[in-house]
Image (cartoon, helix red, strand yellow):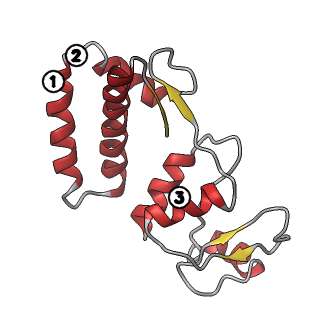
Amino acid sequence: MKPAWDKLMTNFQGSATVVVADVDCTADEAKSVCEAQGVSGYPTIKYYNSTTGDKGEDYSGGRDFKALKKFVRKVLKGTERVCEAASREGCFPEEIEILSKWDKEPREARAARLKALDAKLDTVLKADERKKVELEAKMLRVLEKGEKAGGASAEL
């Protein structure tokens, strides 16, 4: 479940409507927060909105990325941040860096790199390396999608 949750946090990072975060309840500095929220088993997913109160509600849906994303969008009304590849509006600095590196490269070179990144994602990677590879692949898809549509932007 951790990879799906990390991907969910990345997708909604910078969203104006929802915050997706995690807390390591096994860490000494977080134990009091987790106890106050009634978290005793791990992993526990809780959500908070105007109807749940300070204690939130336990999430009991699917734990894969698709189910989590659907819940955030439909139930919590979360919207993903949009990165406009052409203008760089709404993009984080690390996204701009990747877009700048690849936007002038031939489409074939980007397609080859994306294929290599997808193959790499099918292997076991450390979490920080996985995030880097996923981000580069996502930005290459933004460029590809933009070329096909005549402009480049994507929800992230």
- Answer yes or no: do the residues labelled 1 and 2 have beta carbons within 8 Å? yes
Instruction: Please tell me which of labels 1 and 3 falls first in the chain.
Output: 3
Q: Nearer the viewer, residue 9 or 59?
A: 59
Q: Position of residue 133 (x, y in %)?
A: 30, 43
Q: Is residue 85 above or below residue 11?
A: above
Residue carrying label 1: 109
Residue carrying label 3: 69
Label 2 secondary element: loop
Q: Nearer the viewer, residue 153 or 32?
A: 153
Residue under the point 15% across and 41% down: 116
Q: Nearer the viewer, residue 49 or 128?
A: 49
Image quadrant in which you'd find residue 49 = bottom right
Image quadrant in which you'd find residue 29 = bottom right
Q: Which residue is farthest front?
A: 149
Q: Position of residue 156 (x, y in %)?
A: 49, 40
Residue under the point 45% across and 54% down: 7
**Which of labels 1 and 3 is toward the front?**
3
Count all numbered tags in the image, as a single digit: 3
Checking the image for residue 105, the label placed there is: 2
Q: Nearer the viewer, residue 10 or 60?
A: 60
Q: What type is the residue that disc 3 sits on?
A: Lys
